[in-house]
Amino acid sequence: MKIYLYALASILAIKPCQAFYIPILAPYSYSQDEDVPLKVVTLDSTRTQLPYNFYYAPYCKPSKIRHQRENLGEVLSGDSIQTSPYEIKSMKNLGCTL
């Protein structure tokens, strides 16, 4: 009986934790003028439950679209991650460039 009391006391002594870690979303520090990849995902519609391809809308389309899968959750949810033609540099204030 004592062992059960010790087990219960040790369980109650442990504080609950509300932190989590997602390996895919680990923080990354960019250095100055480093290229920052910009990716696009599918578009949701208010008129239909089916998602649209991002380039279905009239956006600048790259010459070659590469589909990228980040993790299993994106595959199961139907997200389609693709490359974008926009160029972004870290810590640099630029206008829109393709």
Image: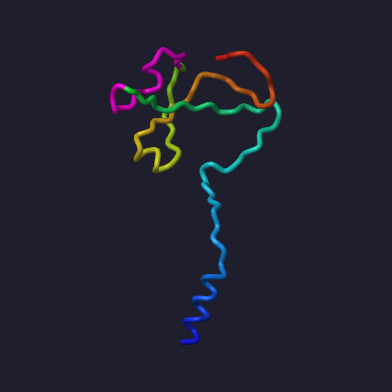
- In the displayed image of the protein, which residue is found farthest to the bottom? 1
The prevailing secondary structure element of the residues shown in magenta is loop
Residue at the farthest right position: 32
Q: Is residue 74 magenta?
A: no
Picture quadrant where residue 87 is located: top right
Residue 1 percent across, percent down from the top left:
46, 87
Which x, y percent locates residue 2? 50, 86
Q: Nearer the viewer, residue 20 or 76?
A: 20
The quarter of the image holding the C terminus is top right
Colouring convention used in this rendered image of the protein: rainbow
Which residue is at the front of the view, 70 or 20? 20
Q: Residue at x 49, y 22 (%)?
A: 84
Q: Is residue 74 left or right of residue 9?
A: left
**Which of the 4 image quadrants contains residue 31?**
top right
Q: Which residue is pictured at 39% across the width and 42% down the height?
A: 73
* Placement of 63 over or under 78, stated as above or below: above
Q: Residue at x 51, y 47 (%)?
A: 22
Q: Is 87 drawn above or below residue 37 in the view shown?
A: above
At x 29% / y 28%, what residue is drawn? 49
Asked if residue 55 lies in the magenta stretch, the reply is yes
Residue 59, placed above or below residue 27: above
- Position above or below: 53 against 16: above
Q: Position of residue 90 (x, y in %)?
A: 66, 27
Counting from the top left corner in percent of width and height, residue 21 is at 54, 49
Q: Which residues are magenta?
A: 47-61
User: Count the marks: how many?
Assistant: 0
